[in-house]
Amino acid sequence: MLGNLRNLFRYRVLIQSLVVRDLKARYRGSVLGFLWSFINPLLQLSIYWFVFTYIVPTGRDVVGMSPYALFLFTGILPWTWFSSSVLESSSVLMTSGNLIKKILFPAEVLPMVVVLSNLIHFFLGLPILLAFLLYYGKIQISLLAFPAVVLLQLVFSLGVCLFIAALAVHFRDVANIIANVMMLWFFGSPVIYSYLNISPSIQRFLNYNPMTHILVGYHQSLFTGSLGHWPWLLVMVPASALTFLVGYTFFDRLRETFAEEV
Amino acid sequence: MGTAIQVSDLTKIYQRYSHRKQFRTLKSALLGGSLLQELRPDERFPALEAVTFNVREGSTFAVIGRNGSGKSTLLKVIAGISKPSSGTVKVNGRISALIELGAGFHPEITGRENVFINGIMLGLSKREIEERYEEIVAFAELEDFIEAPVKTYSSGMYMRLGFAVAIHVNPDVLLIDEVLAVGDEAFVHKCIDKISEFRRRGKTILLVTHSLGLVEKMADEALWLDRSRVQMRGDPKKVVDAYLAQVTQHEEEELAAAEAKTSAEFEAPRPEDDGKGSEVEPVSAFARERGRWGSREVEIQEVSFLDASGSTKYVFATGEPVTVRLKVSTTGTIEDFVFGVAIFNADGVCCYGTNTHLEEFTPVRLSGAAEVRFVIPELQLIEGTYFLDVAAHQRDGYPFDYHRALHQFRVQSKVKDVGVYRPHHRWEFAGGVRLEPPRTA
């Protein structure tokens, strides 16, 4: 395992250039190009805001969720990072099968590149979030906790994505199942609702979901300004690390079968 | 001189998982949480069995064998892409594998960007690529297109760029898998030149190829893989000859089976009393459809190809003596008859045709059983499959028995010359010209 982690350090140039390639390739040829990285979250936000303000006005004026558009945005951006990463990971080893089959290539780099290029997209959405925060005067000291939450999510996502990527090679059904699982996971995480406003009996279930604590972390550091959830975030430190180790170990165990199975 | 590649007792077993099984394992894996234990194959297929050999540092080593004999698997295991099921592979020095050219290219980004990423994938540092960049682009002859997305490249351009990057990794050990089969003639020569340069610089090359000429020309040692096992190893000339002998034997068996099938298929009923043919001649004279027609007053019962020793075979070398033997029979006595043969190549082009009438033999009498031999002292045909027409008819063309394209044979040649026939020839040079004669056996 230690050797593997050392290898990862060696692959950093490779990972870096693949992330850059992904970003370049993603919008090449489209008229708006990189602007899509800003427009996409903005459009997504407007849809949610419209639906939950005018069609099903649940979140309006509820304590801890107002202004609702901003509340939504603080959750949707990191959630998109997570769910896109998982979805893309479920097919990345197959779509890059050529690399695994035809050249000597460290396969774990592929899901990692997926997570990292989605992280860059997440970062590209941040200036818009920052603009909203400024507009509503929400720049507060709790913002300092933000990078820590990002790091937690990064480590957790890497673990999940490595696991899913390896699993999907052997069970192609995973790619289909995962789309639905992510939908369920979305509603099971406090993105469109607030963790604090739900009944404790449901909270108890949500506590088993690591994304709950990560999202509450975002809400509190960016939105409410209180860091009352810190004990849970502290629990998430070993939990994320464990997820990563389990995911990586699983990936490593199946690694040798990839060249034949993809 | 050390050993560059050391393969000992290498076995590679491919495992297949059936779909039913897969469903069950996913279910039980999810329910039982025993995923790693449940991934058990239900079918095993050995791609390599107990393969052992060494490649000396600085030598060129060729691997030959029929499709599916395990050549590519061997290369992948040596390259480290696949893991051996048992046995070991040791490689000394930096390795670069030309298994599929441009395998890591991304279609949406430019050639330049792909060169850098591909180089990094193949283990170069950014700096090393920058140093070699100009050379790579020049070698690929893509100066004008390097800033265009790779998806706009023709397949030839793609291959050229892939080869250029891979070759400029400058490995100590170069693995090549049949990649020279692509690309135009000029580029293939360039690649071969580059590989020759590698040899001269004392690098080790392991080459998997179907081009036996290339093996004899370049390799210091050859290995013949047959059905996952090492069949033979040693001097390239000897290995290639042994391999060719087996290929020939295989073709012989195939052609003999085809001949047996043909004679069963066209074993026609005896002619009617009125003497009219039971089958009519095909309408189109151009369509080279296989067929047999004629009145059968004279019947060609058997057609065989004989070699110098008089035994039947179907595969001949260019320049070998061949005898076409017709066994004919007739019930009555015939006084007007002609025997003819014609050789067609696989494209349906008549390479040669003649008959006893054209060559001004005068028929006198044919009765009972007879044997007609058409003797070719030296078969001057190029490599390929040929079809033989044989016929017995009257001088006015009235057919007794006509076999169109029913009999086939193969010609093999070490020289890959082209054309319809191969005249006797030699080359002479005089004045300010000097050529190395070919390496002959």
Image (spheres, grey):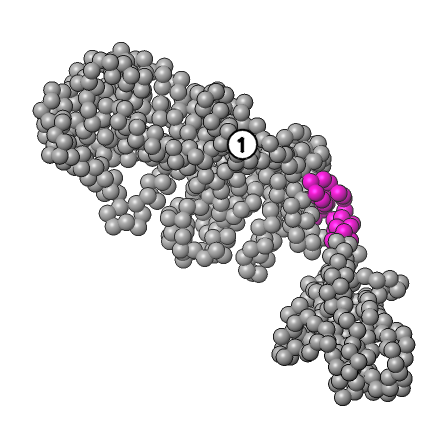
Tell me where residue B413 appears, x and y as whole percent: 73, 62
Let me know if residue B429 appears in the view: no
Q: In the displayed structure, would residue A185 be above or below residue B55? A: above
Does the magenta-highlighted stretch encompass residue B433? Answer: no
Identify the subunit bearing mark 1.
Answer: B
Quarter of the image containing the C terminus of chain B?
bottom right
| Type of amino acid under label 1 | Lys
Element type where label 1 sits in the image: helix
| Residue at the (36%, 40%) spot, across then down | A22
Left or right, residue A200 beside residue B74: left
| Residue at the (60%, 32%) spot, across then down | B42
Left or right, residue A155 beside residue B170: left
Does the magenta-highlighted stretch encompass residue B224? Answer: yes
Residue position marked by numbered label 1 in the rendering: B21
Tell me where residue B363 appears, x and y as whole percent: 86, 86
| Residue at the (56%, 40%) spot, across then down | B96
Left or right, residue B32 beside residue B192: left
Relative depth, front residue between B17 and B109: B17
